[in-house]
Amino acid sequence: MQPNKSSFSAKVLEIKTLFRRLPTLAARLLEETLVLIYPPMCAGCSRTLDAEESTLFCPDCLTALDLISEPYCPLCGIPFVAEISKSHLCGDCLGGAHSFDRARAAGFYQGLIREVIHRFKYGGQTFLLKPLARMLVVPAKDLIRLHRIDTIMPVPLHYRRLRQRGFNQASLLARTLGPLLQIPVDYFSLKRTRWTDPQIGLSRNQRAANVKGAFSLKSAEKIEGKGILLLDDVLTTGETVNQCAGVLKKDGGAREVVVLTVARTVAG
Ligand SMILES: [Zn+2]
Ligand SMILES: [Zn+2]
C-alpha cells in the first residue's frame, strides 16, 4: 500500500519541529533536574524556597528589600525621603544637570540589596545575577513606557578592572535582562578608554573630574538615532552614566539615553 503522502509530510514536519525544539527541551530537562538536586534558595538568607514560590527571595527577605517607590523625581528618579506627598522635579533636574534623559533604580543601596550586590560583585556569587536582574524588570518597564528603547548597553569596565574582577557585572545583568525585555544588548559600541580610580570617598566634583573623558565609542554605527538603555549595578552621583550619556549623544548621535540600575545611593 502506498503511504499517504500528506500524512507522510505531516510526520516529517513533526520530526523537524521536534529537532528544532531539542535544545529547548534539553535545557528544560536539565533545569528540572538541577532544581531536584539544587532546590531554589532565597537570594537573601539561603533558605530553601518552596516549589510554588516563584520569587527568588523568601517572603521575609522580600519585605526587607528597600525598594524605591514614589514620590521620586520623575526625571532622575531620586526618591524623596522627606514627607512629600507628590513627585516633582529635583533641584538638579530643574538646573538641567544631567546628560541622560531619565533614570530609574529598583532600590536603595543599603541593607539587604547592598549586601546581595556585594556578594554578587566581590564575593563571586554569580548565581545572584538572576534575582538582581529580576529586580530590574519593574523599573525597566517604567522606562519602556516612557521611552522607545532600541538597545540595552551595559556601562563598560576598563580592561584592567575586567581582568581583576573576571566579569563585568553590568554586562551580566544586561545578558539576563535583555531576553526578559526582548531588547537586544550592545556590549561593544561603548568602551572605557581611561583607567579611573574607584569613585568611593570622592566628592561630587572629584567624581566628575575622575570620569571625565573616560569613555569613547568603538563605533557609532549602532547608536545613531537609537533610544539606549544604559545599565549598571549602582548609581551614586550619576557622574559615570552622565559621561556615558554625553558620549552616546554627542559622538554617537543617540536619540535618547535612559539609565537603569539595581540600586542607587541617596545623599543626606
Ligand atoms: Zn530569605
Ligand atoms: Zn531629578
Image (tube, rainbow, N blue to C red):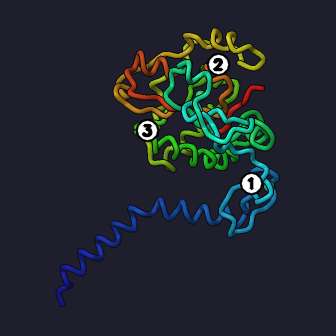
Identity, as a three-letter code, of the amino acid under mark 2 = Arg
Closest to the camera, between mark 1 and mark 2, is: 1
Query: Quadrant of residue 108 in the image?
Result: top right
Q: Is mark 1 within 8 Å of ligand 1?
A: yes
- Identified at 33% across, 72% down, the residue is 14
Residue at the disc numbered 1: 62
Q: Residues within 10 Å of mark 3 (few under 14, many from 20)?
A: some
Identity, as a three-letter code, of the amino acid under mark 1 = Leu
Residue at the disc numbered 3: 147
- Identified at 39% across, 25% down, the residue is 254
Residue at mark 1 to residue at mark 2: CA–CA distance: 36 Å
Q: Is residue 224 positioned above or below 79 on the image?
A: above
Q: Residues within 10 Å of mark 2 (few under 14, many from 20)?
A: few
The number of numbered badges drawn on the structure is 3
Is there any visible trace of residue 170 in the rendered image? no
SS of the residue under disc 2: helix
Residue 180, x across and y down, in percent? 51, 50
SS of the residue under disc 3: loop
Closest to the camera, between mark 3 and mark 2, is: 3
Query: Quadrant of residue 171 in the image?
Result: top right
Query: Quadrant of residue 160 in the image?
Result: top right
